[in-house]
Image: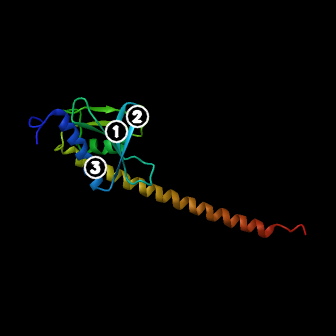
Amino acid sequence: MTAEKIGKQEMKRRTKAHIQEVFEHAGFVAVERSAGAVNYIALKPNMDTQYVAASIYGDRRGAASIWVKDDVFNALKAEGKVSADDDRTIQDVSFFKRGMAWKIEIHDLSDSLIKDILNKTLVWWNEVEVALAAADAEKAEKARLAAEREAAMDAKRRSPF
């Protein structure tokens, strides 16, 4: 479907729904949120995590925009998926403090960049999961060592009676 066959507002609605569907199919959970008068969809790896992997917003010029993490954007840029020569708006949104660094315009629901963003977001999440697992293992090891030290100190202590 092209923008000429359907209205601009319908194309925007369908594009946002398509992006959400693509991410949900990959296992992400969509959570509707609002920031003041602006409604958006936060895409989380699962409901149990505090992390938001990407967000779907409307866009004045394009059909939608996806806000992504800095690591995701840098990976897209390194592979040449986004560049300064592109006919798309790319803006720094890190100052909004919503956990995202870059806004990338999506032209329509057939935009190939949607899958590229998904793939790089999955890579980012896998790296986060590895780091979280390592942090959990380190925390468990510290707790085990603390318990050993406490037991050793308890063995050294004299009873007052």
Q: Where does residue 105 sit, x and y in percent of width and height?
A: 25, 36
Q: Callout 3, which amino acid?
A: Leu
In the picture, residue 62 is in which quadrant? Answer: top left
- Residue 35 lies in what quarter of the image? top left
Q: In the rendered image, is residue 107 in sight?
A: no
How many residues crowd mark 1 within 10 Å: few (<14), some (14–19), many (20+)? some
Asked which secondary structure carries label 1, the reply is: strand
Vertical position of residue 30 compared to residue 160: above or below: above
Residue situated in front as seen by the camera: 24 or 141: 24
Mark 1 and mark 3: span between their CA atoms?
17 Å
Quadrant position of residue 93: top left
Q: Is residue 7 visible?
A: yes
Image position, residue 47 (x, y; %): 41, 53
Give, as a three-letter code, the residue at label 2: Ala
Q: Up-down: is 9 above or below 150?
A: above
What residue did someone put label 2 on? 35
Which residue was labeled with disc 1? 40
Q: Which mark is residue 111?
A: none
Residue type indicated by callout 1: Tyr
Q: How many numbered badges does the structure rendering display?
A: 3
**Measured from the top left, where is residue 110 in percent x and y?**
16, 44
User: How far apart are the two marked residues, 1 and 2, measured between alpha carbons?
Assistant: 8 Å
Q: Residue 41 at x, y = what percent?
A: 34, 42
Judged by depth in the image, the label closer to the viewer, 1 or 3, is 1
Q: Quadrant of the C terminus?
A: bottom right
Q: Can you say which quadrant of the picture contains the N terminus?
A: top left
| First in sequence: mark 3 vs mark 2 | 2
Residue 118, labelled with which disc?
Answer: 3
SS state under label 3? helix
Kindly indicate whether the residue at mark 2 contacts the one at mark 1 (C-beta within 8 angstroms): yes
Q: Earlier in the sequence, mark 1 or mark 3?
A: 1
Q: Are marks 3 and 2 in contact (CB under 8 Å)?
A: no
